[in-house]
Amino acid sequence: MSKSSTESHIILTIKGQELAFAPNTTAYNSLINDMAMDNKIAPTVTYLRRIVVP
């Protein structure tokens, strides 16, 4: 049994446009490692850019 490539995607529809995200362990671990008490926004933006499907 093979796993579909879209099975692990999160698809958001915003104003009629679909955005697909493919979260993965490597990107999540980088997010956790980059996050600091005084800096949470930049690592989150970087994480979302890493997991967005072109």
Image (cartoon, grey):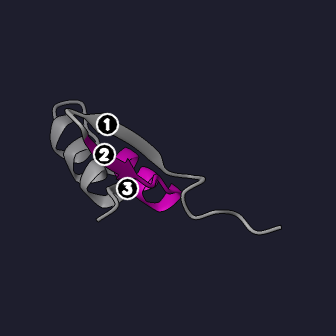
Percent position of residue 15, x then y: 19, 32
The outermost residue toward the bottom is 2
Q: Which mark is residue 18?
A: 2
Q: Secondary structure at mark 1?
A: strand
Q: Amino acid at mark 2?
A: Glu
Say which residue label 1 marks.
13
Say which residue label 3 marks.
30
**Span colored in magenta:** 17-32
Q: CA distance from mark 2 to mark 1?
A: 4 Å
Is there CB contact under 8 Å for labels 2 and 1? yes
Q: Amino acid at mark 1?
A: Thr
* Left or right: 42, with 11 as reference point: left
Q: Residues within 10 Å of mark 2 (few under 14, many from 20)?
A: few
Q: Is residue 24 magenta?
A: yes
Q: Residue at x 24, y 37 (%)?
A: 16
Q: Residue at x 46, y 44 (%)?
A: 10
Q: Residues within 10 Å of mark 3 (few under 14, many from 20)?
A: some
Q: Nearer the viewer, mark 1 or mark 3?
A: 1
Percent position of residue 44, x then y: 26, 42
* Left or right: 49, with 4 as reference point: left
Percent position of residue 52, x then y: 32, 56
Q: Nearer the viewer, residue 7 or 51?
A: 7
Q: Secondary structure at mark 2?
A: strand
Q: Residue at x 24, y 34 (%)?
A: 14
User: Where is residue 3, by image quadrant?
Assistant: bottom right
Q: Secondary structure at mark 3?
A: helix
* Left or right: 22, with 8 as reference point: left
Q: Amino acid at mark 3?
A: Ser
